[in-house]
Image: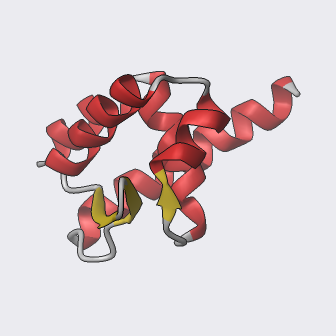
Amino acid sequence: MILSVLSALAEPTRLRAMHMLRDGEEHCVCELMQAIGATQSRMSRHMQVLKQAGLVVDRRDAQWVRYRRNSDVPSEVRAVLDAVLAVNFDEERKVA
């Protein structure tokens, strides 16, 4: 499972999406698309990979899909995810 998580996070678009979902809130795919600059089909494909890795859950809301971080991931996966997001966040702050 850790390998699929790391593989999912290795792609910059998915990593940016996970950063947006760090707040624990639900985000519409339209918000993710706009912030990341991705088309709807591209964003949906990336979110599907994150979902298959068990990192996000989704909920349909009319024509949109809303995503949030999966709170039921095993503790070792949560530790890896938190570490990756923390390191990446610190690196982005240094560049900015």
33 is higher (above) or lower (below) than 57: above
Residue projecting furthest to the bottom: 72
26 is higher (above) or lower (below) than 16: below
Q: Judge by depth and name the residue closer to the eye, 18 or 2.
A: 18
Q: Judge by depth and name the residue closer to the eye, 65 or 94.
A: 65
86 is higher (above) or lower (below) than 75: above
Residue beneath the point at 74% across and 32% down: 92
Q: Judge by depth and name the residue closer to the eye, 58 or 17.
A: 58
Residue 61 in picture, x, y percent from top left: 37, 66
Residue 52 in picture, x, y percent from top left: 14, 46
Where on the picture, by quarter, is residue 16?
top right
Residue beneath the point at 48% across and 27% down: 13
2 is higher (above) or lower (below) than 42: below
Q: On the rendered image, what quadrant is the C terminus found in?
A: top right
Residue beneath the point at 71% across and 32% down: 91
Direction from residue 33 to residue 55 in the image, left or right: left
Where on the picture, by quarter, is residue 49?
top left
Residue projecting furthest to the right: 96
Direction from residue 65 to residue 77 in the image, left or right: left
